[in-house]
Structure formats: C-alpha cells, structure tokens
Image (tube, helix red, strand yellow):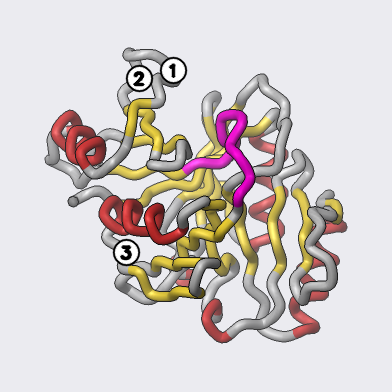
Amino acid sequence: MNTRLVNLVIDAARPRVLADFWAALLGWRVAVEEADEVDVRAPETDGWDLDLVFVPVPEPKEVKNRIHLDLASTTPAHQEELVSRALELGAGRVDLGQGAVPWVVLADPEGNEFCVLEPRDRYAGGAVASIVVDAHDPERLASFWTRLTGWPISAREENVLVGLRAPSGRGPWLEFLRNDDEKRVKNRVHLDIAPPEGAEHGESVAEVVAAGAAPADLGGPDLPWRVLMDPEGNEFCVLTPR
C-alpha cells in the first residue's frame, strides 16, 4: 500500500494555546496557524516527519485518550527536567492507577495524557519516544497499521505490546499496547495518512478499506479527506495526495 503517516491530530478547545504548550515542551516550533488548525513541527534533526496538528472542537474531553505520546529522556536528570518543564508550562500529574512505575504520567493543559519515560536505549534520538495506541489485540492492530504506513513490526512484548518503526530507524515508534477498556466516544487524538502526490484519492481509500478499515461517517461527504476507522474503531483520516 502506498499511504504514509503525515499527521498526529489532537482535538482542542484552544488550539493555539495547546500548540504553544507542546512546542515549548518539545523544543519544536509552530509552523502553521490557520482558522481550522495549528501545526507544530519538529526540526529535521529530530527525525519526526509528522506534523503535530491541533484542531478546534466544541466537545469537552470526557474519557482517557486511547492514543497518547510517550516522551523520551536521556538520563534520570533529564527526565526530571522534562517533568518540571511540563508542570511549569501548565501540565498536571495524573493517577491512572499506574502505581510505582519508573515513568511519570502527566496531562497537558486540556487533559490529554502523556508519559515522560525513564531513559531507554530503544527511544534514543528524539523528543518523542512513541505514539501509543490502546489495543484489545495489539498484534492484529499492528498488522493493520503496518500495511497503511509501510513501517515494519520491529518490537514485541508478548501479549503486551507490538511496535512499528519507520524504515529509516528515526523518529517515534508507533506502539500498540494491550488495554481492555472499551472505546466509548470519538477519539480526541487520531492519525492522518495520505497517498503520494499523483495518486488517485478514491483508489487509495478503497485500498485502505480493503485492508480492514470501515467508514466513520464523520463530517459529511463534502470534506476533501475521508474519515475511516481501524479494526478497533479508532478514527483516522485519509488525506488528499501529497
């Protein structure tokens, strides 16, 4: 399949405020500001090829997100520094029942959960360690997303986690983590994929559906992109070729 990951999209009550928080925390920059979105972009040296996109929505956050970011640290002191910086910028600590773990669970100013990991060799090289997706069946969901992204399965923890990594070996992992919680509302965080320039959008959408996606029917038929759901109901968009 010829689609690729292009964006991680976060619903927001105040997109510019949330974009400023994440840009400051990650050391990235606000690259695009329009009425319907604000994009935060990593420096080329970071290895992250996706935009972090914040879009306005009227709905408040209701439940724990099924997709979240894990941030990487290089030393215990660096982990503490990241946590302190996040708290100073407006994040808060979150208790999800994680108990005594070496990582720190926080939430951004609109309640979106994220983790600041202890140093791990696997995640060296960028500000973001991984995009983590809750999954009832990590193996099945990883198999679906490896077809859409072209990222091979590069890590497994039996019955717990399956991780994809870009063929370049740079940038964040895309990880599917075992979680039995039921999905109850539209995800506030989702992925965008896109076919390459010159491809036919309808044909690309048909290929994604044939791979196991289902229509989500969000936003109506007049949008230039198509909203679909993966095999566990996580919404994602197939954007126009680019």
Q: Label 2 crowding class (10 Å Cα cut-off): few <14, some 14-19, many 20+?
A: few
In the rendering, which numbered label is found on residue 187? none
Q: Residue at x 38, y 35 (%)?
A: 237
Residue 42 magenta = no
Residue 219 is labelled as 1
Label 2 vs label 1: CA separation?
7 Å
- In this orientation, which residue lies closer to the viewer: 160 or 1? 160
- In this picture, is 55 found above or below 129? above
The residue at 67%/22% (across/down) is 59
Q: Amino acid at mark 2?
A: Leu
Q: Which residue is depicted at the point 84% across and 55% down?
A: 95
Residue 162 figure quarter: bottom left
Quick check: 160 above or below 34? below
Badge 3 amino acid: Trp
Q: Position of residue 76 (x, y in %)?
A: 77, 84
Compute the Cα span from label 3 to label 1.
29 Å
Discs 2, 1 touching: Cβ within 8 Å: yes
Residue 52 x %, y %: 53, 48
Rate crowding at label 1 as few (under 14), some (14 to 19) or many (20 or more) other CA atoms within 10 Å: few
Residue receiving disc 2 = 223
User: In terms of secondary structure, where does tag 3 sit?
Assistant: loop
Please tell me whether residue 152 is drawn above or below residue 187 in the rendered image: below
Task: Tell me the element at label 1.
Answer: loop
Residue mark closest to the camera, 2 vs 1: 1
Q: In the image, is residue 159 above or below residue 131? A: below
Highlighted magenta segment, given as a residue range = 180-190
- Looking at the rendered structure, the kind of residue marked 1 is Gly
Is residue 238 left or right of 12 when viewed as pictured?
left
Query: Looking at the image, is mark 3 or mark 1 earlier in the sequence?
Result: 3
Picture residue at 39% right of the left edge, 20% below the top: 217
